Amino acid sequence: MSAGAGAGPAVGEVVDVGEWAKPLPGLDAVNGPYWKAAREGRLLIQECPTCGHRQWYPRALCTACGADPVWLETTGRGVVHTFTVIRQQGMPAFKAELPYVVAMVELAEGPLVFGSMPGVDPDLVAIGTPVEVWFGVADDDTGVPFWRPVP
Amino acid sequence: MADRTPVIVGIGLSDFPRAPHLDGVQHHVLAAQRAIADAGIDKSSIDGYVNAGGSGGGDMVDGAIAMAEYLGIDHRYLDGTMTGGSSFEFHVQHLASAIRTGLCDTALVTYGSNQLSRMGRALGTGGMHRGPSRIAGPMGYEAPYGNSLVGSYAMHARRHMHEYGTTSEQLAEIAVGVREFAALNPNAMYRDPITVDDVLASKMIADPLHMLDCCAITDGGGAFVMTTAERAKDLPQAPVYVLGAAAAMTHWNVCQQTDFTTCAGEKIAPIVFGQAGLTHDDVDLLMFYDSFTITCLILLESLGFVGKGEGGPFVAEGNLKRGGKWPMNTDGGGLSSCHPGMRGIFLIVEAVRQLRGQGGAAQVPDCEVAIAAGSGGWLSAIGAVLLGKEAP
């Protein structure tokens, strides 16, 4: 199944998007669980058990108080905080998808997360548009969270 | 007691906007030679060296320690702070302190890049990563999504429009005004006059930013010499005084920006104006980092020249144009003249030129105080320097 097929993926669905040709994160001890969870259909952020601060991207410390954060699974829902429509991009894997939306999404749980909406008509996106996550499979250890307007 | 007030006594530019005969290191060298000659100092008197690198060769080629060796500088103060395009405003902040406290007496700052000749015009949209590679560190959280450098600024413009009703026409006025100055600079990359309609009709690169909202991509290099007011007494050029310098960041990667309508300018404006004992109305010239039209607007507001959200109507009234209340980017800016990747040094060089009265056709009448405000990264790291013709 591809991202654009039929009614599209359900919320949090993990989608085989074919051979992965885009850059990926370098996996390490801190970010590994984040990308692995995405591979399994879960979007994680971090929460601090000491001060309650929530953060994205995952780090080895809470940026508010310096303590050790723990994982928090999100609902995978949010609204568009701001966005752009990329109309020129030199890298082939992205060039093939032009134009596409890159956005900051404000999660229901609070933090802003960065992402994109491949296959979504840019005219359907505005600041405030409710969106939901889906995940593209990059490899066995890495899923990539993407966004689309809530139908 | 010797007057250790920090002053700028020499400035130099390499060849631009197209200089295929120079590599990055040669841009550093040519700008340094010209700044040293302009200052009228012996090279051997330089005991501080500052360089952010970034010209494409890597730290071991054009970083601070590598270039100090290449230039043959016997330094006792060295700084390689790299914050992107605002590095040079951070450098002035650091050097002002170093010179006051005697860590060095005479310092050279250099920059050079053959961006255009080496990579063509791919900087803004070429993609930072060339293939399905693994990207280490926080940038890995952006890498899979195909953003562009232009897109990062476009997200700021979009949010600013949403919150304050700022329009593409208002942003376009910034590009039009800077182009008017570029027409007066024989070395500027683009000199033909443009209109608001031209900007709006230019190709959309990343909504809502059009091609003419984006800076040029050029080759170029710059350098300046800082020393004490005491030493400046024996030198040929009238010294330009560092009245204040402040710098800070809110984030580095754009995915960590939390308020897309502003930047660290809000944090540093009270510091830099407080140091100088000046108000915004004392400023005669704005040298603002114009990577994109929106960059200028956010600097203008965050540094307090106008209230938050008031920037759009203010620029549309022509206040930043030639003859306006605060003429901006009299050398033609990054938008139309020179942007080899990190423009912050050119802001300082042009401010000094204007304060000396060497601005030629673009000279701002009675220019006594100028502000150079750099933006590094994605409105990430902001540095502001107040420069004056008279001693503080």
Image (tube, grey):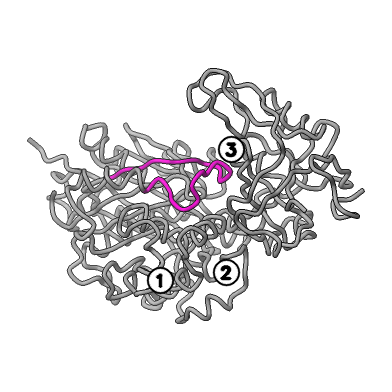
Q: Nearer the viewer, mark 3 or mark 2?
A: 3
Q: Looking at numbered disc 3 in the image, what kind of residue is underneath it?
A: Pro
Question: In the rendered image of this protein, does residue A31 appear above or below residue A9?
Answer: above
Question: Which residue is at 36% across, 66% downward?
Answer: B329
- Residue beneath disc 1: B178
* Chain letter of the residue carrying label 2: B
Residue at the far front: name it: A151
Q: Mark 3 Cα within 10 Å, few/some/many (few <14, many 20+)?
A: some
* Chain letter of the residue carrying label 1: B
- Residue beneath disc 3: A111
User: Looking at the image, do the residues carrying marks 3 and 2 touch, with CB atoms under 8 Å apart?
Assistant: no
- Per the model, the C-alpha gap separating discs 1 and 3 is 37 Å
- Per the model, the C-alpha gap separating discs 1 and 2 is 16 Å
Q: Position of residue B199 (x, y in %)?
A: 53, 75
Q: Nearer the viewer, mark 1 or mark 2?
A: 2
User: Looking at the image, do the residues carrying marks 1 and 3 touch, with CB atoms under 8 Å apart?
Assistant: no
> Tag 2's secondary structure?
strand
Q: Looking at numbered disc 2 in the image, what kind of residue is underneath it?
A: His
Q: Where is residue A146 in the image (x, y as percent from the top left)?
A: 74, 46
Q: Looking at numbered disc 1 in the image, what kind of residue is underneath it?
A: Val
Q: Mark 2 Cα within 10 Å, few/some/many (few <14, many 20+)?
A: many
In the rendered view, does B199 fall on the left or right side of B275? right
Q: Nearer the viewer, mark 1 or mark 3?
A: 3
* Chain letter of the residue carrying label 3: A
Q: Do labels 3 and 2 share a chain?
A: no
Q: What stretch is highlighted in magenta?
A: B245-265
- Residue beneath disc 2: B210
> Tag 1's secondary structure?
helix
Question: In the rendered image of this protein, does residue A29 appear above or below residue B368?
Answer: above
- Per the model, the C-alpha gap separating discs 3 and 2 is 30 Å
Question: In the rendered image of this protein, does residue B71 appear above or below residue B296?
Answer: above
Q: Where is residue B360 in the image (x, y as percent from the top left)?
A: 27, 74
